[in-house]
Image (cartoon, rainbow, N blue to C red):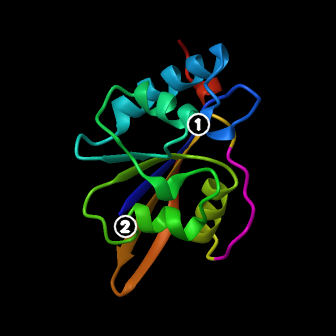
Amino acid sequence: MELILWRHAEAEIGEPDEGRALTGKGHKQAWKMADWLDRNLPHSCKIISSPATRTVQTAEALGRKFKTHPDLAPDCSAEQLLAAANWPNSREPVLIIGHQPTLGQAAALLVAGQMQDWSIRKGNVWWIAQRERGDITTNFLKAVMSPDLIAK
């Protein structure tokens, strides 16, 4: 299975938290990353977003069909995120658009094997995949991409 974690782009500061929208810079970050993802994601990729405004706006930049999932809200746990992605049993790659600290915690759990507070920057993507060799399955970091690295 492949799990792609995309942290929402830069958002306004304010309350209520779930209603915060992307800033102008955030929209640019989302478009840049969406362009890179669109060129690299398989067409069969399942896309799931937090219902928060900033994650929905980030997902919309990709221009592909996606669903929101209540278990991906800003206060969700890494375990809820992995269950929403059907990790490790999904037959297709899954892209999750979500929040810190949950994305970083899920990445740490999958790559390091234990819950840690890893930081995923706004707008960044971490692509985690599995490799099977014989009876051993390992998770590895396939790619990390930042909108700052994408020319446009």
> Residue 95: x, y in percent?
41, 48
Establish if 111 lies above or below 5: below
Q: Which residues are magenta?
A: 114-120
Residue marked by disc 1: 8
Residue sitting at x 39%, y 69%: 131
- Tell whether 42 sits left or right of 121: left
Q: Earlier in the sequence, mark 1 or mark 2?
A: 1
- Tell whether 130 sits left or right of 116: left
Front position in the image: 43 or 10: 10
Residue 59 covered by magenta stretch: no
User: Which residue type does callout 2 highlight?
Assistant: Asn
Q: Residue furthest front?
A: 16
- Tell whether 140 sits left or right of 86: right
Q: Quadrant of residue 132?
A: bottom left
* Magenta span: chief secondary structure: loop
Residue marked by disc 2: 86
